[in-house]
Image: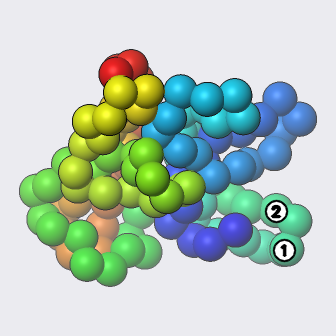
Amino acid sequence: MPINTAVFISSNNTASPALAIQSDGYDPAVGIVIATPTTTSATVQYSGEVSLFTGLIAGETYFLSDTMEGVITNVAPTALGSIVQVIGYAKDATTLVVDIGDVIYL
């Protein structure tokens, strides 16, 4: 799984890419992948600063995408059947302050 992927943790303790839709098989994000020590494991950060990004816009709030699994975006979902979940805000172009928000159902 790529670094910086927004993930949820399934019932069998597996990290899976999150997606901001109301659908079976997807849950809200709980954190961001910061390392993949092996091909079958991932280190997930649940809060605080993650300085592994590129191209963030300082001061912008970042949300879980409703179109691409595990991706964050500075545009909140608006489609019916999506969810809005804040993942954090950009401190600068490379640092996301992870502050996972509650889910709003659309």
Residue 50, placed above or below residue 61: below
Q: What residue is drawn where x is 85% and y is 74%?
A: 39
At x 82% / y 62%, what residue is drawn?
41
> Would you name the residue on which mark 2 appears?
41
Q: Amino acid at mark 2?
A: Ser
Is there CB contact under 8 Å for labels 1 and 2? yes
Q: Amino acid at mark 1?
A: Thr
Q: Secondary structure at mark 1?
A: strand
Quarter holding the N terminus is bottom right
Residue 97: percent from left, percent from top: 31, 53
How many other residues sit within 10 Å of disc 1, few (<14), some (14-19) or many (≥20)?
Answer: few
Q: Is residue 36 left or right of residue 48?
A: right
Can see residue 12? Answer: yes
Query: Hey, which quadrant is residue 69 in on the image?
Result: bottom right
Give the image location of residue 92, x and y in percent. Answer: 18, 69
Residue at mark 1: 38
Which residue: 73% across, 49% down?
A: 15
Q: Is residue 63 above or below residue 34?
A: above
Residue 45, compared with residue 24, is above or below; it is below
Please tell me whether mark 2 sits on a helix, a strand or a loop: strand
